Image: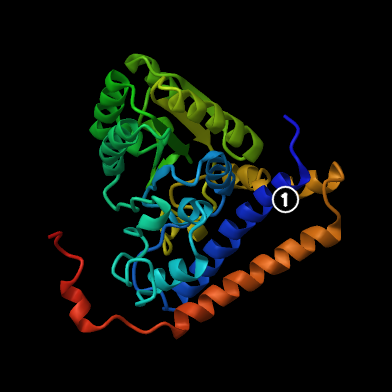
Amino acid sequence: MPYEKRFKLEMYQKMLELRVFEATVQQMYEEGFIPNSAHLYVGQEAIGAGVAMAMREDDIMLPSHRGHGTILAKGCDMNRMMAELFGKADGYCKGKGGSMHLAVADHNVMGSIGIVGSNMSLAAGAGMAAKKNGRGQVAVCFFGDGAANRGTFHESMNLASILRLPIIYVLENNFYAISECSRDMTNIEKFSVRAAGYGVPGETVYGNDPWAVYESAGRAMERARCGEGPSLLEYVTWRHYGHYEGDPDARQWIYRSRQEHEEWMARDPIPIVRRQLLGDNTATEGELLAIEESVGRAVEAAVAFAHQSPWPDIKETYTDVYAV
């Protein structure tokens, strides 16, 4: 599918924002400025960017525990996201959500959840609301290969199928549920075949190709908006680091193969897309450098914003706890 220059550069910029933001989160974590856990999205940017580019502004997002990238791709403010990770008062959740409970109501981001697979149950509720309001919204639920083996996956998909709910199940298959390889935990080669058991379309797509991600997500969303129900999209990819920041596998190769890692690193989507843009004359080296410098400045500004933001008042401990 041919794309306009503006669209292709926007895709590259969005992917780059996710990469530089997460690389900076890693640095800030190691320097002690991020007081909670961090599950980095580095390597999976083509999925977050591709799916987000296919979404409407009013669509609902349900991120996974590895959610910084997808939330940022939805268009959320980088400054407030970084402040939230720092635990500061200017964060989206006043510093109380942190990395794994980051919600952004203004952008219909229902929030990352630390309990693996639990967002799929919430997706059913979001899908019901989207169907009832009749505005053509879809709910996009992100999860990994590990979550696909939990009961919530099957329960949610079964209900979504019965009720024809407008839900896109985005399975980011990076092959590892913490330290266990999905190839050792399932007897299927592709998770997408499970969709057939619920009468739902399923598709496996190479997740490091943002154009393939965008097109497959767009088809599924159009189908959902037309009242034809949910879809399961499995995007095959690779996380560059361990399960969490500090996971020794990132340096010591405890449970992953160094050889397989190097093979996937050669498929890193960002340098590949950069070469594509130069190779097909979409952009010049100068134009890409300008984008890269702009992204770098934006992330630096986000870090400065987080440093300058105040700590929450102790009284905030008792706010936003119960709904009245």
Q: Residue 215: in sight, yes or no?
A: yes
Image location of residue 30, percent across then percent down: 46, 74
Tell which of 288 and 150 is nearer to you.
Answer: 288
Q: Considering depth in this image, is 246 or 97 the residue closer to the camera?
A: 97
Dot 1 corresponds to which residue?
9
- Look at the picture and state if 74 lies above or below 127: below
Placement of 311 over or under 142, stated as above or below: below
Residue at the spot 51% in from the left edge and 27% down from the top edge: 222
Q: In which quadrant of the rendered image does the C terminus lie?
A: bottom left
Residue 224, position as x, y percentages in the image? 44, 26
* Residue 209 appearing in the image: no
Q: Nearer the viewer, residue 135 or 206?
A: 135
Check disc 1 and report its element: helix, strand or loop: helix
Residue at image position (30%, 39%) is: 126
Residue displayed at 49% across by 64% down: 77
Residue 275, position as x, y percentages in the image: 79, 47
Is 314 on the left or on the right of 52, as rendered? Answer: left
How many C-alpha atoms fall within 10 Å of the one at disc 1: few (<14), some, or many (≥20)? many
- Viewport quadrant of the N terminus: top right
Amino acid type, mark 1: Leu
Q: Nearer the viewer, residue 324 or 306?
A: 324
Residue drawn 26% across the image and 43% down it:
118
What's the image's color scheme?
A: rainbow
Among the 4 quarters of the image, the one containing residue 320: bottom left
Q: Is residue 208 left or right of residue 78?
A: right
Q: Quadrant of residue 209?
A: top right
